Amino acid sequence: MNKKLNMRSRIKKSKPKSIKGALNAHWRITLLDKHMVPYRRIQVPAQSLVIAAADLMYQTMSDGTLNINDTGSVARNVGDLRYFWRAEAAVTDDTLGIVVGTDNTATTLTDDALGTLIDHGVAAGDLLYGSCETGAPIEESGPAAVYAVLSRLFVNRSGGNITCEEVGLYVEYATFDFMIERTVIQFTINDTDAALVEYHIGATA
Amino acid sequence: MNEMLEKSKILYHDARRLARKIIPPKMEYIGYDQSLHPLMKMGLEVSVLDHNGDVRVKKKMPNVNTFHWGFVDLFTAYWSQGIGGGDYDITTTSGGTKHPDQSESAGEEKMFVGGPINNDDYGVVVGTSNAAIDLTDYALTSQCDEGVGLDNLNHGATGFVAPATDGTSRIFEVFRTFSNNSGADVDVEEVGLYARMLTQNAVSWDYVMIERTLLSFTILDTDTDTVRYTISVVV
């Protein structure tokens, strides 16, 4: 109990400071027990967009054509103004949207996929992927900020605890999937428990 | 397996509701870090040339003032593109609201900033107001129109420099040249970046402001200036 209280005492908390002229994002993970009652929340700043983020943004803004590696490390030339970053995904789809993995290797600019993706399923080491959905934007004050929100629920029915070491965002552009963001963060989803993983990206004034 | 999936769908909706609305008294916050880390940065550079082509003014800002609400709204709108999404309102540069088209049909545009020559609807734009920046700004306060009248400028075509890797950064550029043929000096106080999008059901083109920054410089009569945005991802 004392240990828990000590943890709670650490809630307060770095005050967010404005970072003008930059997009920022954070990952928020809420762990839920088998009754779907939340009992732990973790939040970290998103560590890095990767090369596909810049290149896809350029293509959407400019009608340019670049070879960009998809999540299978295959170069795709897909410049087309009709696409941006589609990230919503259906239940069971572990190829698009918010994804999780077990590799804690530091992110580099040229990463094009998670180190070790956790598959959808109920086998050992698997997680059940819920749908990846867009939420209403979040408006904050002090400093003024606005965030677009994506979220996905992962349920563990694998028969064992699963420790995630990385989270990422895969988006579809044309018919191909690209990783635009990867962050190394550790959290454990106990057997029968679940985790709601949220990605907030936005700007401060 | 199917039974398990069905169950997980039900649990999913319950969990999403609970996780957002219920904060149990014994909720633990571990590693709860609210600090902010820049993911994508935008810098700005202005060069003013006299009629001989010599540089008269050069200004550089490593960071623009802010990305604006419209840019973040475009993320929300397009995260669900191609699969229906919904009627999502975005405030356009005219101050009205429009639903962006979320389909992926040929000819669609989502966030095109390549404004052509003599066009002041989208691309890099400039204005004459130094009104304070607000995250909810949806347009420049007093934009310089295309033309040769008072405070008008002739807009060149918006250009691009393709992404290149520099160490742990990936950088691309968006730029535009303006010519002053108005017969008088133009005092620029604000710079912005507008994107063109197709509205829902391909009804019309409309425009969303991505960025607005206060930057003061004068374009003398017959001078030209180039405004250059540098957009970078840094690991």
Image (cartoon, coloured by chain):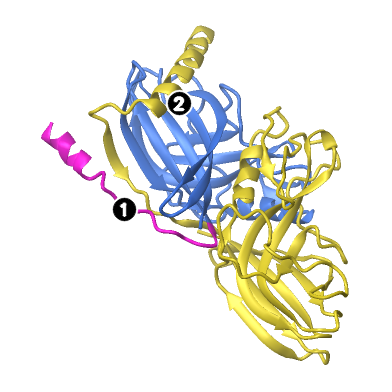
Chain colours: A blue, B yellow
Q: Is residue B223 above or below residue B68?
A: below
Nearer-the-camera pick, B139 or A168: B139
The amino acid type, in three-letter code, at marker 1 is: Ser
Nearer-the-camera pick, A104 or B100: B100
Instruction: Point out the stretch of residues depicted in magenta.
Output: A1-22
Q: Is residue B146 above or below residue B40?
A: below
Q: Say if the magenta span includes residue A147.
A: no
Nearer-the-camera pick, A149 or A152: A149
Which residue is outermost to the front?
Answer: B150
Which percent across, then down, holds residue A61?
73, 54
Please, which chain is the residue tagged with disc 1 on?
A: A
Going from N to C along the chain, the mark reached first, 1 or 2, is 1
Residue to which mark 1 is pinned? A14
Is the residue marked by circle 1 packed among few (<14), some (14-19), or many (20+) residues within 10 Å? few
Foreground: disc 1 or disc 2: 1
Q: Is residue B39 above or below residue B220?
A: above
A27 displayed left or right of B233: left
Is the residue marked by circle 2 packed among few (<14), some (14-19), or many (20+) residues within 10 Å? many
Q: Say if the magenta span includes residue A2.
A: yes
Residue A63 visible from this viewpoint: yes
Residue to which mark 2 is pinned? A154
Where is residue B179, by image quadrant?
bottom right
Which percent across, then down, holds residue B231?
63, 63
